[in-house]
Amino acid sequence: MNIPHSKYPRVVIIGGGFAGIALAKKLRNKKVQVVLIDKHNYHTFQPLLYQVATGGLEAGSIAYPLRKVIQEHTDFYFRLTSVKEIDTENQKIISEIGDLHYDYLVIATGSKTNFFGNKEIERNAMSMKTIPQSLNIRSLILENFEQAVLTNDQAEKDALMNFVLVGAGPTGVELAGALAEMKKAILQKDYPDLDISKMEINLIQSGDLILNTMSEKSSIAAEKFLNKLGVKIWKNVRVTNYDGRTVTTNSDLTFETATVIWTAGVQGAAIPGLSSDALVERVERIKVNEFNQVNGYENIFAIGDIASMETNDFPKGHPMMAQPAIQQGKLLGENIIKLINHKPMKPFEYNDKGSMATIGRNLAVVDLPNFHFNGVFAWFVWMIVHLLSLIGFKNKAVVFLNWLYNYIRFDREGRLIIRPYKKKSFITFTSDEV
Amino acid sequence: MNIPHSKYPRVVIIGGGFAGIALAKKLRNKKVQVVLIDKHNYHTFQPLLYQVATGGLEAGSIAYPLRKVIQEHTDFYFRLTSVKEIDTENQKIISEIGDLHYDYLVIATGSKTNFFGNKEIERNAMSMKTIPQSLNIRSLILENFEQAVLTNDQAEKDALMNFVLVGAGPTGVELAGALAEMKKAILQKDYPDLDISKMEINLIQSGDLILNTMSEKSSIAAEKFLNKLGVKIWKNVRVTNYDGRTVTTNSDLTFETATVIWTAGVQGAAIPGLSSDALVERVERIKVNEFNQVNGYENIFAIGDIASMETNDFPKGHPMMAQPAIQQGKLLGENIIKLINHKPMKPFEYNDKGSMATIGRNLAVVDLPNFHFNGVFAWFVWMIVHLLSLIGFKNKAVVFLNWLYNYIRFDREGRLIIRPYKKKSFITFTSDEV
């Protein structure tokens, strides 16, 4: 990987998400050599991916160049690659662009979509964990409507205008709301030759509560908001398959659809090489102690979504979201320096700042640790928190401007198929000579 | 294509560029049925493609949804497809999504890169006529630097940091300037492990003047500005080949480079089916009379870059740029209505508003019909004209904000490899264990 020798110990960070960046910033000019590795050259602000997918924001507004994050750090390197394996015995990582020795290794690879082993769903459904995936969803949504105008077969038209979202966590709920707003404000005007009232947004949840990581009040309010927007919510339904046309479930219920967006599960984006003792089966997270040290290793750490720190409050690890990742990254920055200087490390304690989800225009739900609120004020809070959390002044300003414009004009001008999502045509074209 | 019958004659417009959109707007609610066809679902503001390619602007900022352009037009349809052929005998077009009868056909397909028959250059060089192509260039530029940090072979490093632009028209000049600014303001900071002073920008022009469509004063000023920015200009040099590593020319001069961007020629994006009498050989433009009527056809028109209207002032047709396209589109909108109503059409007269090019920060050249100026004021004029020409308020506002930010901060945050440009690795990676 062509990293020069340093007189300082080398810390290799895999992943430039919330956790990796928070750590990188803490290690700035701290008598360590740092190598940050990511398979993208930018940080992704994942909470707003659904707005990229629905044309409300451009990809560049929620991405931030990783090299800019570390621009003024000395003895700090970035490498664009995928890590294929960790060789713990020889203390090195193996990547597409060569191997690299580490003194300290931090795994901050985040999470990826979990299809629970169903290969056919994986093949036919869309995921939304990265910017390219979100752009694919955007293209597919629009390509569906462009195809729907071409057919007179009502069943084909209906399937193209039926959007099935599996999983009613924050991502599924926010996406359902955004689709409902597209339907109301844009698609009706853009496709006068379609009966857009036939467009369906079906949100499927395996349990009996949507937003089940939030308070019951939030869940109920979100359901009310979604109903108001015309989203059909199916609770206690488990999707069993999707062959590219028909969604089957554990009941008699089926859906004919050209689009399934799968937000029903996430799993750690694990890298081969750690001992099996360090892994949590099924969810592929990495077991860490209170210092985010990986089980069985002195100099390997895991932070963020990939890390599973079992505590009394969180027996299955912290929620896979931005806040624990940022807090773990920051603390680990301090702890690595302590470890190098043979000082005792500080155990992690999660400071729960609450959680929130937006459903649509003026509609959001917010859970603070001891307080719930929803509606217009919650929506303002959601916007302000997300604006302030974006990295970089330009992104903040451009997102703000887009939101203001979209709000005033009921519009989303990012309805652009820049790179078509290559999928075989859903319909058979009819030639006409009228 | 599933277009309903209409009591009005059908006008089919192929292409939603400057010409096609100007025409579409004129035909709004005018007792004609209009079908607008494009292979993208958005209009591209081509003059700013080079800023997308160099990370100064996001793709979405210079694209505008075509369906939004025609949102409030009645009896107006948009279809997303490529037209494969025109069947003039049966008055229909043949496309990927079926055939369509026309009463009036307007070809507004614009232009594409002309490699003058050299297939090897075509295979190995980059074009910059569309947004996806510009995004590919952006990815390639950044991927080059990400690869350059990985090798210690100086020849490989140099080739990766050598950018050869063939053709010093406005596109080549503007791109060269933007690359020079990236070098100065960004790459130095982003890649501390590279000696960015070794980065070369070579601009090759076959004639003895750059910007040869502009005044000699502009040409000389632009050359001075480019020299100031460190761009190497090679005049009277003709590129003969590029095999993916070495550029050969008609002299002894060669360049070792991973990147050739070809802006040396354009040709009409012609569609098969017209009689050979209607075509201008070599440049593939379509011969039209003073009403933009295609030679030999009563009801087929061509406007914009694709149309070659030979006049005394322009014996080889109007320059292939936005202004003639917009003016022809507007006039044809009126003329088609006149033709339908059996009224005499009005001949086209080009109102030359001048031309301009920007080289970099505070550096631009402007030719008005009888007046030339350059420098800071020209640069302001360039910015204002381009801002006002962008379609849509949001695009104007976002572009303005980006420019302001980029200007104040000497930055371009769009240096994102969203979709890697798939090209085989230019270098051989070395594994290291330091």
Image (cartoon, coloured by chain):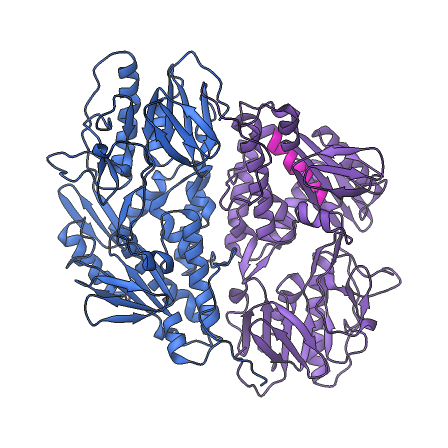
Chain colours: A purple, B blue
In front: A212, or B104?
Answer: B104
Specify the principal SS of the magenta part: helix
Q: Is residue A361 visible?
A: no
Q: Measured from the top left, where is residue A193 in percent x and y?
A: 54, 22
Residue found 76% across the figure and 71% down from its top:
A292
Q: Is residue A215 left or right of residue B272?
A: right
Q: Residue furthest bottom?
A: A7
Residue B379 can be seen in this image: yes
Image position, residue B335 (x, y; %): 26, 20
Q: Position of residue B366 (x, y in %)?
A: 21, 48
Give the residue at x 14% y 38%: B314
User: Where A394 sits versus A81, above or below?
Assistant: above
Q: Quadrant of the C terminus of chain B?
A: bottom right
Residue B278 picture location, percent across and down: 23, 32
In which quarter of the view is residue B138 placed?
A: bottom left
User: How many labels sit on residues?
Assistant: 0
Q: Judge from the rendering whether residue B275 lies leftward or rightward of residue A78; answer left or right.
A: left
The residues colored magenta run A172-183
- Say if the magenta span includes residue B393: no
**Of B426 and B100, the residue lying toward us:** B100
Q: Please, is residue B69 above or below residue A268 in the view?
A: above
